[in-house]
Amino acid sequence: MASIDDEILQGAQEDAKEVAFIQNYMGVENRDLFTEEDIYYCLDVMLEYLDNMNGEADADGYIDIDTEEIAHHIQKKAKKEGMGPYDLDALILLIDAELEYNEQLSEE
């Protein structure tokens, strides 16, 4: 049985792998748009937003994801919380990267 420390370490390793995937997906020309802290922040806001959409799933359990709407939400919340500012197109790219990462995970 894994200890809580092992689980925390494994979670941190998974998070680092996810951030590396996102940075690679975004490409060298966009790498400086977000720090690791920015990426973690944006992902947290995105997941919080998607969790609140749970009631909006269709009959098959799928949620129609509007990346531009999510990006606007992140911009608004980030401004309130003193983060950013984040460019809308850069946020959409980050969201696309996160969705692609999760798609690849679900295929494994």
Image (cartoon, rainbow, N blue to C red):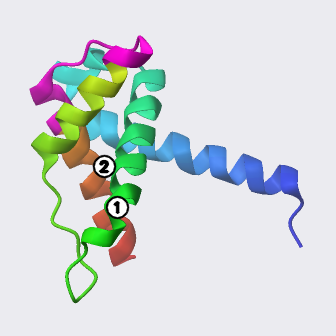
Q: Quadrant of residue 41?
A: top left
Residue found at x 42% / y 48%: 48
Q: Which residue is mark 2?
A: 98
Percent of width and height locating residue 94: 24, 37
Residue found at x 26% / y 25%: 76
Task: Provide the residue span drawn in magenta.
Answer: 79-92
Q: From the viewer's perspective, is 4 left or right of 72?
A: right
Q: Quadrant of residue 12?
A: top right
Tag 2 near tag 1, CB within 8 Å: yes
Q: Which residue is mark 1?
A: 102
Can you say whether 19 is above or below 55 in the image? above
The kind of residue on which mark 2 rests is: Glu
Q: From the viewer's perspective, is 33 left or right of 82?
A: left
Q: Residues within 10 Å of mark 2 (few under 14, many from 20)?
A: many
Residue 26 appears in the rendering: no
Q: From the viewer's perspective, is 25 left or right of 67?
A: right
Q: CA distance from mark 2 to mark 1?
A: 6 Å
Residue found at x 41% / y 23%: 38
Can you say whether 19 is above or below 38 in the image? below
Percent of width and height locating residue 64: 15, 66
Residue found at x 86% / y 66%: 2
The kind of residue on which mark 1 rests is: Asn
